[in-house]
Image: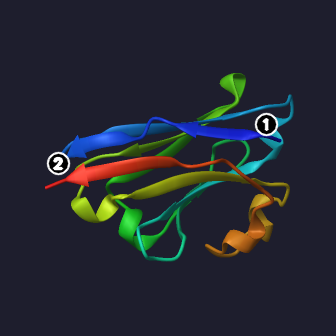
């Protein structure tokens, strides 16, 4: 599967963004999807994941409350809504997909994911 993330940009602190990740192929609903981010000078970190059906989600503790992951399998797209943006949210955001089933993904490791998009840059100004 090929992934393309978009929707990033420059926003002021307190604003909102919705990132999108479009996937190729006709089996999108079989993939667990995740969002990661990498801030300047830092390692890539997990943000959120969603099961193939969209019925289950998982967030890192720092993302709970302000981030919402969702998907539209009819459009082969996964979304990441970010509210109340903070300067520390500045990062390149990546979407990722995995063949593994939801119950096989027991943590936030990027090693679970097989396919990656190119990333979209989010810059939050103070």
Residue 79 visible? The answer is yes
Mark toward the viewer: 1 or 2: 2
Q: Which residue is mark 1?
A: 28
Q: Residue at horizontal 50%, vertical 53%?
A: 93
Q: Residue furthest front?
A: 41
Badge 1: few (under 14), some or many (20 or more) residues near its Cα, within 10 Å? many
Question: Which one is in front, 31 or 92?
Answer: 92
**Relative to residue 5, is residue 90 depicted above or below?**
below
Query: In the image, 120: left or right of 13?
Result: right
Query: In the image, 17: left or right of 70?
Result: left
Badge 2: few (under 14), some or many (20 or more) residues near its Cα, within 10 Å? some
Question: Which one is in front, 55 or 89?
Answer: 89
**In the image, residue 25 lies at what x, y percent?**
85, 31
In the structure shown, which secondary structural element does the residue marked by tag 2 occupy? loop
**In the image, residue 46 lies at what x, y percent?**
54, 67
**In the image, residue 29 lies at what x, y percent?**
78, 38
Query: In the image, 98: left or right of 41?
Result: right
Contact check, label 1 and label 2, Cβ < 8 Å: no
Q: Residue at horizontal 17%, vertical 50%?
A: 13
Question: Which one is in front, 82 or 41?
Answer: 41
Q: Residue at horizontal 41%, vertical 37%?
A: 18
Distance, label 1 to label 2, CA atoms, is 33 Å
Q: Residue furthest top?
A: 74
In the structure shown, which secondary structural element does the residue marked by tag 1 occupy? helix
Q: Which mark is residue 14?
A: 2
Q: Quadrant of the C terminus?
A: bottom left
**In the image, residue 10 lies at what x, y percent?**
29, 42
């Amino acid at each position: 599967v090929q992934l393309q993330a978009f929707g990033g940009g420059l926003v002021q602190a307190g604003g909102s963004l919705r990132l999108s990740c479009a996937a190729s192929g006709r089996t999108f609903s079989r993939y667990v999807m995740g969002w990661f981010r990498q801030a300047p000078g830092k390692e890539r970190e997990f943000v959120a994941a969603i099961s193939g059906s969209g019925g289950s989600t998982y967030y890192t503790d720092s993302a709970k409350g302000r981030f919402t992951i969702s998907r539209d399998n009819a459009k082969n797209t996964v979304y990441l809504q970010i509210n109340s943006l903070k300067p520390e949210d500045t990062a390149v955001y990546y979407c990722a997909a995995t063949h593994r089933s939801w119950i096989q993904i027991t943590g936030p490791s990027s090693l679970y994911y097989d396919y990656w998009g190119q990333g979209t840059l989010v810059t939050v100004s103070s």
